[in-house]
Image: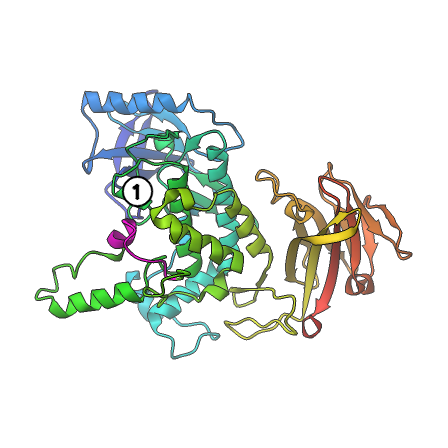
């Protein structure tokens, strides 16, 4: 779905004879329109058939029967999917709950300067950390990227979106229509809640499916070409397309080869009102273009957007290369969706938020960390590193979590630092480090986790209540021992930037 401007208000009635005034198109796509209503907690979804609302009796009955089948799916309260509250009367559609303090993930997509009103264009000023040589279009997109939380915020939300989709797949259900307007995220940066709407397309995965529902630009090639119906592999491909665009500020296929061919078509165009050829989305949707970071074909290399090393970890880049490389035309070769939440969350935890609004990746072997956008340097970083512990001692790295260490700022370290990644609990705070006046305290934030802490003599003691930490303790390094679900050693250390 794509966002639309306000439409003329109209009324609809549900099966309980309740009237709902539609005030604004929240999103519109080939499958239907989602409207805001005068009730801030309710939305109305109106399906479309051939671009028109369904009002004939047979069409309404077919739609209602489809929704009745929705209640037979094994959905549970842990799944963040909005389900119909009431069906509409005498027309196809339904009323659903509106997620408060949330907005479509499409709000994190690249923002176009030319889409602004003329007055807003005139008032826009590039931030001081951007060079005056940066074109206004790029400056505006980067400014919006920073204001909406930079790469770190995007990684956090995408990790949770992947978790929500994985919950559906775990019970054999596919979402089918992944799009920027069907995934809602927390507006407040303190939260990373994600909910999925448009539940009317949910269904069990079938091996021989021949139909599928997609939003243009976000469909798997085999579904676009009607060679196969929607499956979990198609869902994973669609989410990967959305995730890459949100992170890199460009489409996965908007590379040099496409731009060159488009320019060639422009040279021969005799009427500017006529399209200069098939759009990038049309070519990419059918799997006809290589990935802009393809590991084997650089004919369509990256031109626009942010460089991969600024927004992707090596593991994430490898995931996208497989998904949009071999997996582009061979669905069975696509990487599993199970790997994506962990890769995104790991990248988010290794990201350092800068005061300019952007973020950059922690590199443990660099002598100094500098924001590549504004050249600022955080004075100190708190780095938490966990290692699996075996009978032979410390083994491989389990997780890394890093954040600027600033006086007065409390820190919450997530459960995934334990080495275990549970999609329902990975983001739950496991440890908290709080400052009270000039003292720092650490304590366990969950009840079902047993952690020991090394005292000044190097002996491990149960971490109960709040444990006082001297500043020198944090600078020297604090060691914790986590007994379950794995034996893990966690080191927490405050490091001066020029000593990293």
Count all numbered tags in the image, as a single digit.
Answer: 1
Picture colour scheme = rainbow
Q: Residue at x 23, y 35 (%)?
A: 48
Q: Is residue 452 magenta?
A: no
The one of 133 and 9 positioned closer to us in this rendering: 133
Q: Residue at x 70, y 57 (%)?
A: 384
The residue pinned by badge 1 equals 222
- Viewport quadrant of the C terminus: bottom right
- Viewport quadrant of the N terminus: top left
Task: Magenta stretch: give its range.
Answer: 281-292
Q: Is residue 127 visible?
A: yes
Outermost residue toward the left in this view: 270
Q: State whether residue 169 is above or below residue 148.
A: above
The one of 141 and 452 positioned closer to us in this rendering: 452
Q: State whether residue 156 is above or below residue 118.
A: above
Residue 190 x %, y %: 57, 50
Residue 418 x %, y %: 69, 46
The one of 136 and 402 positioned closer to us in this rendering: 402
Q: Quadrant of residue 229?
A: top left
Q: Is residue 192 visible?
A: no
Residue 374 x %, y %: 52, 73
Q: State whether residue 145 is above or below residue 433.
A: below
Q: Residue at x 52, y 72 (%)?
A: 372
Residue 467 x %, y %: 82, 51
Q: State whether residue 278 is above or below residue 74.
A: below
- For label 1, the SS is helix
């Amino acid at each position: 779905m794509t966002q639309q401007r306000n439409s003329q208000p109209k009324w609809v009635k549900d099966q309980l004879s309740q009237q709902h005034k539609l005030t604004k198109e929240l999103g519109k796509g080939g499958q239907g329109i989602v409207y805001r209503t005068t009730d801030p907690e309710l939305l109305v979804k109106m399906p479309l058939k051939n671009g028109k609302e369904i009002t004939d009796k047979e069409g309404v009955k077919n739609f209602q029967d489809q929704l009745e089948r929705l209640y037979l799916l094994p959905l549970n309260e842990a799944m963040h999917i909005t389900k119909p509250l009431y069906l509409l009367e005498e027309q196809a559609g339904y009323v659903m709950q509106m997620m408060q303090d949330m907005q479509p993930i499409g709000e994190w997509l690249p923002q176009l300067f030319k889409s602004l009103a003329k007055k807003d264009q005139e008032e826009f000023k590039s931030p001081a950390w951007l060079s005056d040589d940066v074109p206004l279009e790029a400056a505006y997109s980067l400014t919006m990227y920073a204001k909406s939380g930079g790469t770190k915020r995007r990684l956090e939300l995408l990790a949770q979106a992947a978790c929500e989709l994985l919950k559906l797949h775990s019970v054999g259900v596919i979402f089918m229509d992944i799009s920027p307007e069907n995934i809602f995220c927390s507006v407040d940066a303190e939260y990373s809640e994600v909910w999925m709407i448009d539940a009317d397309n949910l269904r069990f995965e079938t091996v021989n499916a021949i139909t599928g529902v997609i939003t243009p630009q976000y469909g798997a090639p085999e579904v676009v070409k009607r060679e196969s119906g929607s499956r979990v592999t198609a869902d994973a491909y669609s989410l990967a397309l959305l995730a890459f665009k949100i992170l890199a500020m460009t489409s996965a296929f908007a590379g040099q080869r496409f731009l060159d061919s488009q320019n060639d078509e422009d040279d021969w165009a005799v009427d500017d009102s006529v399209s200069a050829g098939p759009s990038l989305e049309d070519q990419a949707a059918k799997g006809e273009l290589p990935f802009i970071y393809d590991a084997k074909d650089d004919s369509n290399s990256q031109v626009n957007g942010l460089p991969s090393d600024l927004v992707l970890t090596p593991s994430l880049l490898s995931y996208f290369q497989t998904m949009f490389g071999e997996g582009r035309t061979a669905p069975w070769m696509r990487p599993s969706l199970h790997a994506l939440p962990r890769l995104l969350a790991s990248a988010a935890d290794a990201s350092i938020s800068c005061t300019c609004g952007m973020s950059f990746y922690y590199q443990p072997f660099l002598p100094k960390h500098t924001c590549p956008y504004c050249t600022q340097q955080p004075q100190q970083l708190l780095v938490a590193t966990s290692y699996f512990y075996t009978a032979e001692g410390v083994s491989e790295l389990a997780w890394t979590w890093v954040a600027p260490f600033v006086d007065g700022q409390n820190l919450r370290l997530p459960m995934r630092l334990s080495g275990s990644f549970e999609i329902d609990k990975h983001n739950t705070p496991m440890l908290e480090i709080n400052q009270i006046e000039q003292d720092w305290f650490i304590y366990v934030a969950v009840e079902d986790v047993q952690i020991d802490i090394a005292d000044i003599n190097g002996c491990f003691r149960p971490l109960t209540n709040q444990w006082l930490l001297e500043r020198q303790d944090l600078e020297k390094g604090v060691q914790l021992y986590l007994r379950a679900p794995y034996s893990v050693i966690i080191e927490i250390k405050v490091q001066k930037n020029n000593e990293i």
